[in-house]
Amino acid sequence: MKRGPPDRKAQAQRAALNALRRAQRTADKAGVKLSDWEGEFLDSVTERVKTYGRAFADPEKGGAGEAFSMMQHIKLKEIVAKAKGEPRFPPKRGGGFKRRGPAKPEPEGD
């Protein structure tokens, strides 16, 4: 029996819920006390994903098939890093158009 193509929205929803559960479980196992804001963030995002299938309304804040916005991804990664005890660094911003080294002189041909 052949299956139809997978439902991308349902896959994204399951992946998001698993990531949220994993973050909460990691913090609980490590004994890390999440701040009130972080706990509320995890709870509210979980509720929105369960209810609507995604945690943000504005399509410009994330991909069409994604369950989290870009900033929600970043915050979730920060919570997981805190739970694992990894050093927390501010997110890196784009470097813009910078040279990667000194300009190479052009060979002179006679």
Image: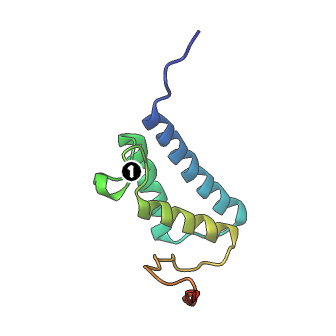
Question: Colour mode?
Answer: rainbow
Quadrant in the picture for the N terminus: top right
Question: Residue drawn at (46%, 77%), measured in percent from left and top?
Answer: 93
Outermost residue toward the top in this view: 1
Count of numbered circles in the view: 1
- Residue 37 point in image, percent of width and height: 45, 69
Tell me where residue 110 sits by quadrant. Answer: bottom right
Outermost residue toward the front in this view: 110
In terms of depth relative to the viewer, which is nearer, 18 or 5?
5
Q: Residues within 10 Å of mark 1 (few under 14, many from 20)?
A: few
Question: Residue drawn at (51%, 77%), measured in percent from left and top?
Answer: 92
Is residue 23 placed above or below 1 in the rendered structure? below
- Residue 108 point in image, percent of width and height: 57, 89
Q: Secondary structure at mark 1?
A: loop
The residue at which mark 1 appears reads as: 63
Question: Residue drawn at (47%, 83%), measured in percent from left and top?
Answer: 98
Outermost residue toward the right in this view: 30
Question: Residue drawn at (54%, 52%), measured in percent from left and top?
Answer: 20
Which amino acid is tagged 1? Answer: Gly
In terms of depth relative to the viewer, which is nearer, 29 or 103?
103
Is residue 40 placed above or below 105 in the rendered structure? above
Would residue 70 appear left or right of 14 to someone viewing this image? left
Is residue 59 placed above or below 32 in the rendered structure? above
- Residue 80 point in image, percent of width and height: 61, 64
